[in-house]
Image (cartoon, rainbow, N blue to C red):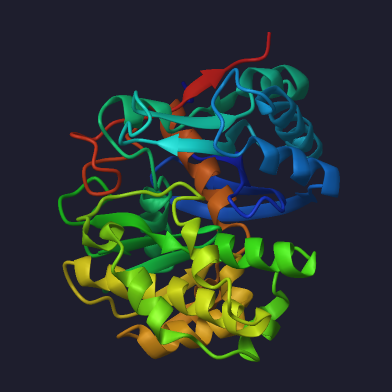
Amino acid sequence: MLKAGPVWAVGTMSGTSLDGVDAAMVLTDGERILDFGRSNYRPYTTEESRILRAALGRWPGEPGVEAAAEVIETAHAEVLVGMVDARIIGFHGQTLAHDPQGLQGARRTHQAGSGQVLAEVLGRPVVWDFRSNDVEMGGQGAPLAPFFHFACAKWAHLETPVAFLNLGGVGNLTWVDPRLPGPEAAGAVLAFDSGPANAPINDLIRARLGVERDEGGALARAGTVDDRIVEAFLAHPWFLKIPPKSLDRNDFHDLLGAVHDLSDADAAATLAACAAAAVARGFEHFPEAPTMLYVAGGGRLNEALMVELARRIPCPIAPIEDIGLDGDMLEAQAFAYLAVRVARGLPTSGPSTTGVAALIGGGQISEPA
């Protein structure tokens, strides 16, 4: 356990977009954010990305998982090796499979990569396996950034309810009321996955054009949205579920089939519209209308997606940078913050963020030998 007072922590994120590893430092006591430090990024090579994609949907012991874990551990060791100022490391790992409902049997979640390996390599304590405890206690295990979002709202001196949107492979929404004293307070936070975001768009672009993404949404901006496909998408039973709720990256894999007969541009435009429409449907669950939606993640750089959001969202939207935060590093910063909370025995999730029955802490701490 850490002694009281602020410490520098570094967090990492290898997200559902599978493009690389983010690492970012936060000065925090596990409750307040006092400062943000430097960040780093290590892209995956083409071969590394191939190995990770081949392991998606697989559980420990299945083919390809060991190779994927080696990629994750190597990339994280490289991105973290120079960040020596951090007293503690928050290591999320790479989500390969996520089944908190137990649809395939037991309730479980799988983030590849060993925090013990990183602790030995880097010579510092590593907090990891953040999600398993929540899932075992009946929660969704995701999203885990909401308590950090609440701290961000306090850091930015916001005084009215706002929402945070992360547009990674999957979209995540967090509604926070910074008028309350902390994220544990009743009514302070509500969070859930909104639906697919970049993952279907990236998969489409990779399959059809052989590149990793629709840079800036250029292809989608040249296309026309097929509203019938968007309407059919919104009829999915997922949108009838009451939050908290979470998704696996490939839960909406049938979206690619829905746009199969569209041109490249129309398909990209339609998938961007689906992502935005999913976020708009999420607003129906908020206890009070937010005064602003702040957008983070790679999707905020897709102009077509941002235009669709502005058209559908009933409040002003802005990139997270408008309040002095880093939209590329927000999730990595979240796991730096959560690492300190775990080390100090503070809760990392609760009924309004993952649906777990009570406030609980997740994660295990590995010390170097």
Residue at horizontal 34 percent and vertical 78 percent from the top: 231
Q: Quadrant of residue 152?
A: bottom left
- In the displayed orientation, state which residue is furthest to the top: 369
In the figure, 8 relative to 19: above or below?
above
Residue at horizontal 63 percent and vertical 76 percent from the top: 301
In the figure, 86 relative to 286: above or below?
above
Q: Quadrant of residue 205?
A: bottom right
In the figure, 327 relative to 330: above or below?
below
Q: Identify which residue, 347 or 246, lies in the foreground.
A: 246
Residue 105, how many percent across, how many down? 35, 25
Q: Quadrant of the C terminus?
A: top right
Indicate left or right for 225 with 126 as reference.
left
In the figure, 78 relative to 275: above or below?
above
Residue at horizontal 54 percent and vertical 37 percent from the top: 57
Q: How many marks?
A: 0
Residue 65, how many percent across, how many down? 66, 26
Q: Is residue 45 among the parts visible in the rendering?
A: no
Q: Is residue 25 among the parts visible in the rendering?
A: yes
Q: Identify which residue, 144 or 103, lies in the foreground.
A: 103
Q: Identify which residue, 226 or 367, lies in the foreground.
A: 226
Q: Identify which residue, 152 or 308, lies in the foreground.
A: 308
Residue 221, how many percent across, how many down? 62, 89
Residue 86, how many percent across, how many down? 66, 37
Indicate left or right for 159 with 68 as reference.
left
- In the displayed orientation, state which residue is furthest to the front: 261
Indicate left or right for 285 with 221 as reference.
left
Residue at horizontal 50 percent and vertical 40 percent from the top: 6
